[in-house]
């Protein structure tokens, strides 16, 4: 046991040295600058492709459920930055990022009143799914937990972000979330197909104010109506389907055969219901892309932030390296506990399956303790029982034994919140100390 502990300490120190050399040393920061310059062009192209997809998909959810735009990520996420003061710079601060409230993250009523032409506003309000009132609302025609709906939307956008993930993996994650939160399966299907169609059309069918020049293809003609375009998308069951559209609004809340829920979609007129010459929400997406471009070369400063000169020279003195080392020690602890359990309970398990169980346990800590929260807020705000149900359902569908998973959860659960709190708090405390902000 003593030899294993000594080996662990040596390995952890070696990993800390490598981490420091690659990220926090002077040479490591310069290497980050060069790598950021290398990927600058492709990063801008990807941002122009991805940002509109997520923003307009989120706006579709806002209109469908009457949710305020400042409640939805990534619509509510924006950052400002400034250079450090002299005292901050001497304390290792390279750049100061702060959360900012974007002007377009508005109440849904303002979204409709500002972005939609006046003659269509009232009918659009009437087609939104309303928040249910117990004893009065009809079952299946309202929702009772907007927080759960927001979480579902965030989870869907997160799994769509992993564009190369197999459809089965994406559906498993979404299905497990809907089941844990008690969301109607048909509602889950509807939201999935709307998001899938919106994202597929960005490149597959050029639409005014949404298509990407030199990347989006001209729409195929829809056979039944040549004035409409054809969008090919993957539905909730993994089946390739087509739908007819004319405008961005068609996908966001228009009635589309075999996709839309009756009474909760809008029969679209021939003209677009959105303003185009003066629409702050469409303009805001373009502004977001430009702000991302303007901030991108600050990435190396953000990665190597909070490191003084003496800390950059010697990893033993570097507080950020020590914080990272403590987090790695926590990870090794989780791995050791699960490995010991598997060696005792399932001694003949093959190495690949053993690693899947360990990855499942690490996911519990990782997903609930993300400091960069976008897309992972659903896990942070789940009740413990909801998290348990989601985790068991997700990993059992990956082929792991349910009883073994239940035992692993019972092993990790007593100190799960403690590890998550340490993980989040250590980074927060370091930032506040370097900025000279009193700890709460």
Image (spheres, rainbow, N blue to C red):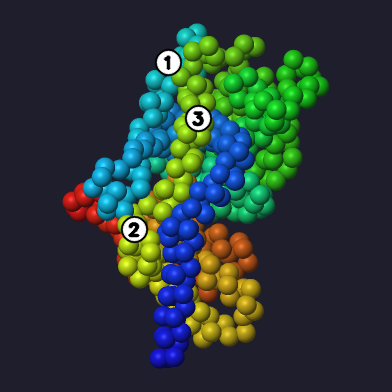
**Circle 3 sits in a helix, a strand or a loop, which is it?**
helix
The residue that disc 2 covers is 309
Using residue 396 as the reference point, say whether residue 232 is left or right of it: right
Query: Relative to 105, does residue 187 appear above or below in the rendering?
Result: below
Dot 1, how many residues are within 10 Å of its Cα: few (below 14), some (14-19), or many (20+)? few
Q: Earlier in the sequence, mark 3 or mark 1?
A: 1
Residue at horizontal 54 percent and vertical 35 percent from the top: 51
Residue 183 in the image, given as x and y percentages of width and height: 49, 45
Q: Earlier in the sequence, mark 2 or mark 1?
A: 1
Nearer to the camera, 313 or 63: 313
Residue at horizontal 74 percent and vertical 24 percent from the top: 218
The residue that disc 1 covers is 113
Task: Please report contact status of discs 3 and 1: CB closer than 8 Å, yes or no.
Answer: no
Look at the image and tell me whether residue 322 can be seen.
no
**Circle 2 sits in a helix, a strand or a loop, which is it?**
helix
Mark 3 → mark 1, Cα distance in angstroms: 26 Å
Residue 310 in the image, given as x and y percentages of width and height: 32, 62
Dot 2, how many residues are within 10 Å of its Cα: few (below 14), some (14-19), or many (20+)? some
Residue 410 in the image, given as x and y percentages of width and height: 42, 72
The label on residue 290 is 3
Q: Earlier in the sequence, mark 3 or mark 2?
A: 3
Nearer to the camera, 421 or 71: 421
Mark nearer the viewer, 2 or 1: 2
């Amino acid at each position: 046991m003593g030899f294993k502990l000594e080996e662990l300490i040596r390995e952890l120190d070696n990993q800390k040295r490598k981490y420091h050399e690659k990220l926090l040393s002077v040479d490591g920061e310069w290497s980050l600058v060069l790598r950021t310059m290398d990927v600058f062009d492709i990063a801008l192209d990807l941002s122009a492709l991805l940002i509109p997809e997520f923003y307009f998909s989120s706006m579709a959810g806002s209109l469908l459920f009457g949710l305020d735009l400042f409640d939805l990520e990534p619509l509510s996420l924006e950052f400002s930055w400034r250079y450090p003061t002299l005292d901050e710079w001497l304390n290792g601060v390279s750049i100061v990022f702060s959360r900012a409230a974007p002007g377009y993250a508005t109440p849904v009523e303002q979204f409709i009143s500002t972005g939609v032409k006046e003659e269509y506003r009232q009918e659009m309000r009437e087609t939104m799914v309303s928040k249910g009132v117990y004893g009065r609302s009809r079952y299946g025609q309202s929702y009772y937990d907007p927080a759960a709906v927001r979480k579902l939307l965030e989870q869907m956008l997160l799994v769509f972000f992993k564009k190369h993930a197999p459809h089965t993996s994406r559906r498993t994650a979404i299905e497990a979330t809907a089941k844990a939160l008690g969301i109607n399966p048909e509602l889950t299907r509807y939201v999935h197909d709307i998001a899938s169609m919106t994202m597929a059309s960005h490149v597959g069918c050029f639409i005014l104010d949404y298509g990407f020049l030199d990347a989006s293809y001209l729409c195929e003609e829809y056979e039944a109506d040549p004035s409409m375009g054809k969008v090919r998308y993957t539905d909730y069951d993994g089946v390739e389907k087509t739908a007819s559209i004319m405008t961005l609004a068609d996908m966001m809340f228009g009635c589309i055969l075999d996709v839309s829920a009756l009474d909760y979609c809008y029969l679209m007129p021939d003209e677009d219901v959105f303003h185009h010459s003066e629409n702050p929400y469409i303009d805001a997406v373009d502004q977001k892309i430009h702000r991302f471009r303007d901030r991108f070369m600050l990435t190396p400063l953000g990665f190597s932030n909070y490191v003084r000169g003496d800390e950059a020279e010697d990893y033993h003195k570097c507080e950020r390296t020590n914080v990272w080392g403590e987090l790695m020690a926590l990870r090794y602890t989780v791995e050791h506990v699960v490995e010991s359990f598997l060696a005792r309970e399932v001694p003949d398990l093959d190495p690949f399956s053993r690693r899947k169980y360990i990855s499942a346990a690490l996911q519990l800590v990782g997903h609930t303790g993300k400091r960069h929260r976008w897309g992972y807020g659903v896990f942070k705000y789940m009740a413990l029982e909801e998290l348990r149900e989601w985790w068991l359902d997700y990993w059992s569908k990956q082929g792991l034994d349910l009883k073994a998973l239940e035992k692993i959860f019972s092993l990790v659960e007593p100190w799960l919140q403690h590890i998550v709190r340490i993980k989040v708090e250590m980074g927060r405390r370091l930032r506040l100390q370097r900025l000279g902000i009193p700890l709460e």
